[in-house]
Image (cartoon, grey):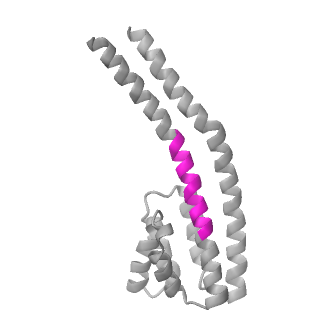
Amino acid sequence: MLKILGVMCIFSASALIGVYFSESIRYKKERLVIIHKMLSDISDYIRWNSFTMHEIADRLSEKKEFSRLDFTVRLSENCKQMRSFPKAWENAVTSDDRLSEQEKKLLTDIGGSLGTTDVQGQLSAIAIYMSDIENMIAEESEKYRVKGKMYRSLGIAFGAMTGILII
């Protein structure tokens, strides 16, 4: 009886590990979609409201839909402490542990271009970054479609194989 319980625990653990790796890909894709939406909102704030970057940072931190991006809350706090928006943005992005290195680099580049040129320059830069993010979203969707299923299947298969070997 104890042996069967141990096999069940091993099977469950390996299946959950497969699900974890699969879900981490899906979560990254969802984060990229949120970042794309955030850039769209920043573009609207610049184009239609003529907000300063510090006002935009406050708006982003207030929006519930961006709460999954920890750096938006830190950005508002950093803007109150620092005068330089690009430096405040960079500090907020680098301190967000949930972001991958690729996301951090992209977001740091975005922050460096905001508030440093005229309105048209900022809108053009945002449009370029939005197309880059759209490509990243497509890549992550394909990765999830292929590798997500593979991770789940491997987790279950490894658990079943280990259970059979133990029994």
Residue 117 visible in the snapshot: no
Vertical order, 12 against 60 (above or below): above
In x, y percent, where is residue 125?
Answer: 69, 76
Name the magenta segment's main secondary structure: helix
Viewer-closest of 13 and 83: 13
Magenta stretch contains residue 35:
yes
Q: Residue at x 46, y 62 (%)?
A: 68
Vertical order, 121 against 102 (above or below): below
Viewer-closest of 156 and 113: 156
Q: Residue at x 55, y 69 (%)?
A: 108
Q: Residue at x 50, y 40 (%)?
A: 21
Q: With 72 as the anchor, is 141 left or right in this view?
A: right
- Residue lying at the far top of the rendered structure: 167
In x, y percent, where is residue 12?
Answer: 40, 27
In x, y percent, where is residue 3?
Answer: 30, 12
Q: With 137 as the anchor, is 75 left or right in this view?
A: left
In x, y percent, where is residue 8?
Answer: 37, 20
- Range of the magenta residues? 22-37
Vertical order, 165 against 105 (above or below): above
- Residue lying at the far left of the rendered structure: 2
Vertical order, 52 against 154 (above or below): below
Magenta stretch contains residue 64:
no
Q: Which quadrant would the C terminus be assigned to in this image?
A: top left
Q: With 20 as the anchor, is 25 left or right in this view?
A: right
Q: Residue at x 48, y 15 (%)?
A: 161
Q: Quadrant of residue 148?
A: top right
Q: Quadrant of residue 166?
A: top left
The number of numbered badges drawn on the structure is 0
Residue 127 visible in the snapshot: yes
Q: Which quadrant would the N terminus be assigned to in this image?
A: top left
